[in-house]
Image (cartoon, helix red, strand yellow):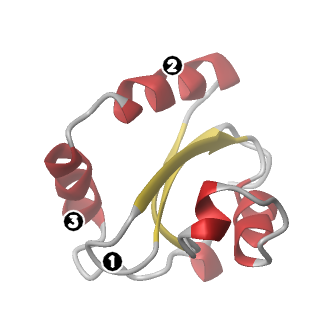
Amino acid sequence: MLHQPCVYILSSKKHGTLYIGVTSDINQRVWQHKQKYNSGFTQKYDITNLVYVECHQTMYEAITREKQMKKWKRAWKVNLIEENNPDWNDLWPLV
């Protein structure tokens, strides 16, 4: 999964504040969130748990999907997470 375009969702806790992002290096990007490397939304709301990852063939596809998901209602995002990760476990050690 390293160096593959991915859309990801982070959460502050189960059913907590959500953040959707896109990256080509999921391990590095989540590590940056966990270290609070960049100031901003995820640092302000302590959003560090990787609860969903979706990989794509190209960065264009990943960015298109990210933009689509950002427009979704919260309930749709929660359903997507719970279909794949019902306990909202932090997936970062697994990627």
> Looking at the picture, how far across and down is residue 84, in whole percent?
28, 63
What is the quadrant of residue 78 in the picture? bottom left
Marks 2 and 1, Cα distance to the nearest angstrom? 24 Å
First reached walking from the N terminus: tag 2 or tag 3: 2
Say what amino acid the circle numbered 1 marks.
Answer: Trp
Say what amino acid the circle numbered 2 marks.
Answer: Thr
Looking at the image, residue 26 sits to the left or right of residue 74; the answer is: right
> Looking at the picture, how far across and down is residue 49, in whole percent?
52, 75
Q: Helix, strand or loop at disc 2?
A: helix
Marks 1 and 3, Cα distance to the nearest angstrom? 7 Å
What is the quadrant of residue 32 in the picture? bottom right
Picture quarter with the C terminus: bottom right
In the rendering, which numbered label is found on residue 64? 2
Tell me the residue that label 3 is attached to.
82
Which residue is drawn at the image coordinates 14% and 50% (left, top)?
Answer: 75
Identify which residue, 42 or 27, lies in the foreground. 42
Tell me the residue that label 1 is attached to.
88
- Mark 1: few, some, or many residues within 10 Å (few <14, many ≥20)? some
Looking at the image, residue 78 sits to the left or right of residue 14; the answer is: left
Picture quarter with the N terminus: bottom right
> Looking at the picture, how far across and down is residue 10, in whole percent?
50, 63
Position of residue 27 relative to residue 80, above or below, is: below
- Mark 2: few, some, or many residues within 10 Å (few <14, many ≥20)? few
Q: Are marks 1 and 3 in contact (CB under 8 Å)?
A: yes
Looking at the image, residue 92 sits to the left or right of residue 87; the answer is: right
Position of residue 31 relative to residue 77, above or below, is: below
Which residue is drawn at the image coordinates 40% and 82% (left, top)?
Answer: 89
Identify which residue, 39 or 71, lies in the foreground. 39
Looking at the image, residue 4 sits to the left or right of residue 38; the answer is: left
Which residue is drawn at the image coordinates 66% and 23% (left, top)?
Answer: 58
Q: Helix, strand or loop at disc 3?
A: helix
